[in-house]
Image (cartoon, rainbow, N blue to C red):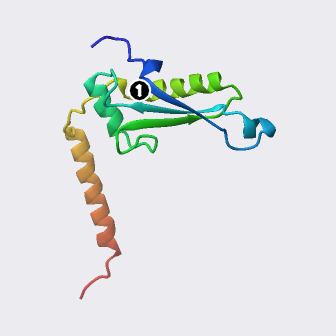
Amino acid sequence: MSDRPPVIDERECEWKAVRAQGAGGQNVNKVSSAVHLRFDVARSSLPDDVKARLLALRDHRITDAGEVVLKAQQHRSQDMNRQEALERLNAMVQSVATPPRVRRPTRPTRASRQRRLDDKRQRSATKQNRRPLGD
């Protein structure tokens, strides 16, 4: 695998222009400046391991069918919203591009085991001293 993280090509995405929500006056009611981006992970050109890690993300933007759905409506321009949606998709892919490090199990050191046992003895003695004296 190359050292460069994968970058999504714009042609692999399905784009749909929609009207933005929220305040904005007449412009919001007339102009479809917001963008819905749909990206099918299974049919993409991403490496298989990156696809698997992307689909394994617990993210509400990934559907059960394996599509990433993003809505960008921050800007007044449709082109800028397209660019922002693509940047967010690439950021999502970058986050899973490098595989997680494998954890190697370690054993506690002798000193840490000794400290644990000393603490146990100390707690035991404290609790013994709290008990009422018997006959």
Quarter holding the C terminus is bottom left
Residue under label 1, please give it.
93
For mark 1, does the 10 Å Cα neighbourhood hold few (<14), some (14 to 19), or many (20 or more) residues? many
Image-quadrant location for residue 81: top right
Image-quadrant location for residue 57: top left
Quarter holding the N terminus is top left
Residue at horizontal 40%, vertical 43%? Answer: 63
- In this view of the protein, which residue sits in the foreground, 113 or 2? 2
- In this view of the protein, which residue sits in the foreground, 117 or 82? 82
Residue 33 at what x, y percent from top left? 66, 31
Residue at horizontal 30%, vertical 59%? Answer: 122
User: Is residue 2 toward the left or the right of residue 87 in the image?
Assistant: left
Image-quadrant location for residue 6: top left
- In this view of the protein, which residue sits in the foreground, 58 or 62? 62
Q: Where 31 sits versus 130, above or below?
A: above
User: Is residue 87 toward the left or the right of residue 111 in the image?
Assistant: right
- In this view of the protein, which residue sits in the foreground, 21 or 50? 21
Residue at horizontal 29%, vertical 54%? Answer: 119
Residue 60 at what x, y percent from top left? 45, 45
Residue 28 at what x, y percent from top left? 74, 38
Q: Amino acid at mark 1?
A: Val
